[in-house]
């Protein structure tokens, strides 16, 4: 099938490359000429494990190409996925101006049937707005007033990819959701995903849009729940890891997304929770539960900073080493990373920061101000009064902890992800503080 993907960010690029990998002919489009140039030369603007190998293979097999032109992509494709950004407005609403622009350009260049698929996370009812925009922007010969004379479909096919394992997630989905208005659209989507053996759920468009919002918000709620529990564990002498394990053994609860830490971040959860709160408000429902989810997340970061302040006494002139800056491991993504807020707060208190991340150094350098970016975990720990672990990269499990202890000014570790072996650190002479592991 000939497919266009509009928007070559994380979601668009992974979707495009993977659809080419399972046998389709795909054009990935982006409005950033530099990005398109880089992609055409075989470069990848993001770090996503496994993506580079299959991308090069698909380009070699002539199943994948890149373009800056929506016109060109619309003319050459039957199915067009929209995967452009839906950034938050100051109100928390998703800003859909990019989606509208893209839809308008697609409509202007349509000359026969097209299936337009929303991949970006959008509020329920966006499907209707897309349909209307197409009807109003088709070439004159294909419309009578505001009526379309050309057959087309709109569908919603939300993505559930996790950064860092997006290629694997695409190839092994636990469900595919098709929000459609016609049998034809369902048939086309089934055909596209045929090579992937996954359970398919067919709904109307609004339900598919809601599934995405509700799923991400529910996962964010799980994280905030265990983070709140971790606060109590820390006070009463319980170990939150045992509590999470005990809860997770109940199949109705499940162990996933019960890892306490410095709060969720990334390009999805914070934005999607905000957008869902706004969508609910607009529909006349005050989703207070989700507002608390957001508040607990903010407090979790604040509580971590307070713990550091409490144990170091004064932060002025103290040097703090940081391991991990990305919002989670196996990605170079710094969007809404907990590290950004935590480091800013520590800097405001007068602390000096030295940091190391295996992949996110370039992106971090653009966002963080006044942070000394170091070439290794050892360099980041050198002469520090304490060390913070903010992202659980595997690399940190293999560091020689005795060497780290010997280069630090004070051997104190705050493990914001409960990732390091606390008992081992204590036996080596470190002060070790995790999240909710008992009385600190
Ligand atoms: C998420 C959803 O998982 C995915 O289905 C959706 O398509 C996009 O949003 P992603 O943002 O890539 O994916 O990351 P995810 O692995 O879900 O982690 C999000 C944040 O939650 C990270 O900051 C992570 O560190 C944090 N997290 C996750 C926790 O703090 N505890 C957990 O138990 C799980």
Image (tube, rainbow, N blue to C red):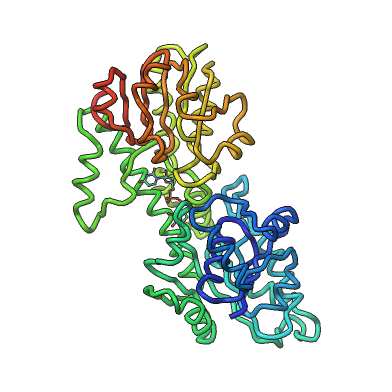
Residue at left offset 19%, top offset 52%: 249
Say which of 412 and 300 sits in front.
Answer: 412
Q: How many marks?
A: 0
Q: Position of residue 77 (x, y in %)?
A: 66, 78
Q: Position of residue 440 (x, y in %)?
A: 28, 23
Residue that appears at 71% across and 84% down: 147
Image spot of residue 85 (x, y percent): 62, 56
Residue 143 falls left or right of residue 249: right
Residue at the location (57% across, 24% down)?
A: 372
The answer to whether residue 126 is seen in the rendering is yes
Residue 352 lies in quadrant: top right
Vertical position of residue 182 compared to residue 5: above or below: below
Residue 4 vs 322, above or below: the answer is: below
Name the quadrant of the N terminus: bottom right
Q: Is residue 123 visible?
A: no
> Residue 399, image x and y in percent?
38, 31
- Residue ranking furthest to the right: 140
Q: Looking at the picture, does residue 11 appear above or below residue 221?
A: below
């Amino acid at each position: 099938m000939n497919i266009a993907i509009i928007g070559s960010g994380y979601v668009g690029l992974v979707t495009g490359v993977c659809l080419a990998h399972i046998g389709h002919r795909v054009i990935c489009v982006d409005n950033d000429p530099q990005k398109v140039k880089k992609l055409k030369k075989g470069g990848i603007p993001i770090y996503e494990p496994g993506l580079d190998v299959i991308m090069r293979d698909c380009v070699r097999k002539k199943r994948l190409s890149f373009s800056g032109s929506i016109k060109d992509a619309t003319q050459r494709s039957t199915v067009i996925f929209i995967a452009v950004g839906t950034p938050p407005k100051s109100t928390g609403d998703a800003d859909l101006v990019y989606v509208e622009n893209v839809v308008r350009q697609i409509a202007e260049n349509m000359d026969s049937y097209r299936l337009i698929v929303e991949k970006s996370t959008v509020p329920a009812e966006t499907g209707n707005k897309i349909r209307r925009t197409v009807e109003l922007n088709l070439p004159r010969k294909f419309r009578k007033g505001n009526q379309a004379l050309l057959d087309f479909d709109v569908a919603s096919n939300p993505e559930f990819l996790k950064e860092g394992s997006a290629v694997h997630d695409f190839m092994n989905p636990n469900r595919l959701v098709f929000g459609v208005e016609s049998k034809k659209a369902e048939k086309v989507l089934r055909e596209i995903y045929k090579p992937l053996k996954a359970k398919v759920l067919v709904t109307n468009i609004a339900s598919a849009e809601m599934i995405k919002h509700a799923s991400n918000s529910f996962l964010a709620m799980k994280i905030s729940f265990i983070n709140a529990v971790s606060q109590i564990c820390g006070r009463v002498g319980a170990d939150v890891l045992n509590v999470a394990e005990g809860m997770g053994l109940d199949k109705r609860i499940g162990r996933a997304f019960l890892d306490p830490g410095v709060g969720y971040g990334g390009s999805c959860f914070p934005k999607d929770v905000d957008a869902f709160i706004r969508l609910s408000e607009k529909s006349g429902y005050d989703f207070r539960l989700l507002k608390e989810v957001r508040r607990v997340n903010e407090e979790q970061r604040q509580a971590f900073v307070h713990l550091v302040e409490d144990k170091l006494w004064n932060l002025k002139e103290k040097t703090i080493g940081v391991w991990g800056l990305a919002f989670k491991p196996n990605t170079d993504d710094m969007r809404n990373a907990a590290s950004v807020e935590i480091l800013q707060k520590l800097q405001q208190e007068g602390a000096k920061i030295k940091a190391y991340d295996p992949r996110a150094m370039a992106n971090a350098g653009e966002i963080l101000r006044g942070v000394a970016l170091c070439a290794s975990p050892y360099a980041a720990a050198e002469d520090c009064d304490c060390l913070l672990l903010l992202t659980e990269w595997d690399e940190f499990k293999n560091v020689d902890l005795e060497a780290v202890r010997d280069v630090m000014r004070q051997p104190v570790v705050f493990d914001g992800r409960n990732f390091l072996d606390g008992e081992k650190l204590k036996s080596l002479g470190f002060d070790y503080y995790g999240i909710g592991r008992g009385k600190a």
